[in-house]
Amino acid sequence: MVRATRGVAAGAWYFEVRFVHLGATGHTRLGWVTNRADLQTPVGYDAYGFGYRDMDGTKVHKAWRDKYADEGYGEGDVLGFYISLPDGEQYEPKQPDLIQHKGMPFHVQVPKEEQKIPAPVPGSEICYFKNGVCQGSAFKDIPGGRYYPAASMYTRPKESNCVVKFNFGPDFEFFPQDFGGLPIPQPVSEVPYQALEVKNEGPVENGIAEKTC
């Protein structure tokens, strides 16, 4: 999985992906993931990702595929990705602390009871668009968190690689004219950069820091 470096926790946001090359054996899953999603798995594999699949236009969450669009997508198509998180900052889980150790940042180990799936954001929604046409509401009342644009791509060995091109705005090819009453989104290009706060040096074991009092 590849993931953008800037994420959103509140408000309405939008980005596009153009399919430059899919080829005979290429396939993709695209969508939104939180910073808890496993980067070694495809989009939609776990509870922290919401994917849109090329082969048949199905949506994917927790590795489960469900009927969504009437058809898939392929080379030349431009997909739009919309997310709305009303008052989402109230539902974003606390981010793990970082501490500095020998010039390197390490995450503070998070207790298991704090790793539960966050509460859903009331009224939140994800929609996908194909060449400017809404394919319908894909997911509603999604868990709180910071969501990032993401893509997973597959190609058989010795075949030309699958290629997609992200467009975070503000100039889109197919910006929708109708969002069906949902909040008008901002382009992901306007997401502010968030610097990580690194605390004082502490003990580190196996690459995971333990919090000290």
Image (cartoon, rainbow, N blue to C red):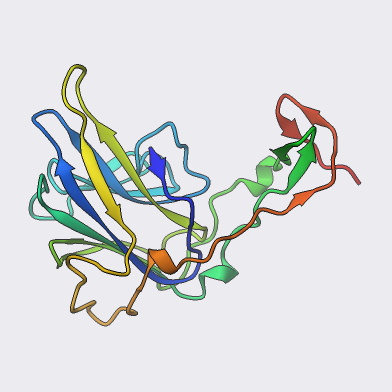
Q: Quadrant of the rendered structure where residue 153 is? A: top left
Q: In which quarter of the image is residue 15?
A: bottom left
Decide: is 30 above or below 83: above
Position of residue 119 measured from the top left corner of the image (x, y, whole percent): 53, 60
Using residue 167 as the reference point, say whether residue 94 is left or right of it. Answer: right
Is residue 65 something that shows in the picture?
Answer: no
Picture coordinates of residue 8 (x, y %)?
Answer: 48, 63
Q: Is residue 173 above or below residue 186?
A: above
- Nearest the viewer among 107 and 50 is 107
Q: Position of residue 99 (x, y in %)?
A: 77, 43
- Residue at 22% over, 39% down: 163
124 up-or-down from 3: above or below: below
Residue farthest along the top direction in this orientation: 158
Q: Is residue 138 rendered to the left or right of residue 160? A: right
- For this view, does 1 lie left or right of residue 104? left
Residue drawn at (84%, 40%), measured in percent from left and top? 201
Observer-nearest residue: 81 or 191? 191
Q: What is the count of numbered marks?
A: 0
Q: Foreground: 13 or 53?
A: 13
Q: Which residue is drawn at 79% across and 35% down?
A: 101
User: Is residue 87 rendered to the left or right of residue 140?
Assistant: right
Residue at horizontal 17 percent and vertical 50 percent from the top: 67
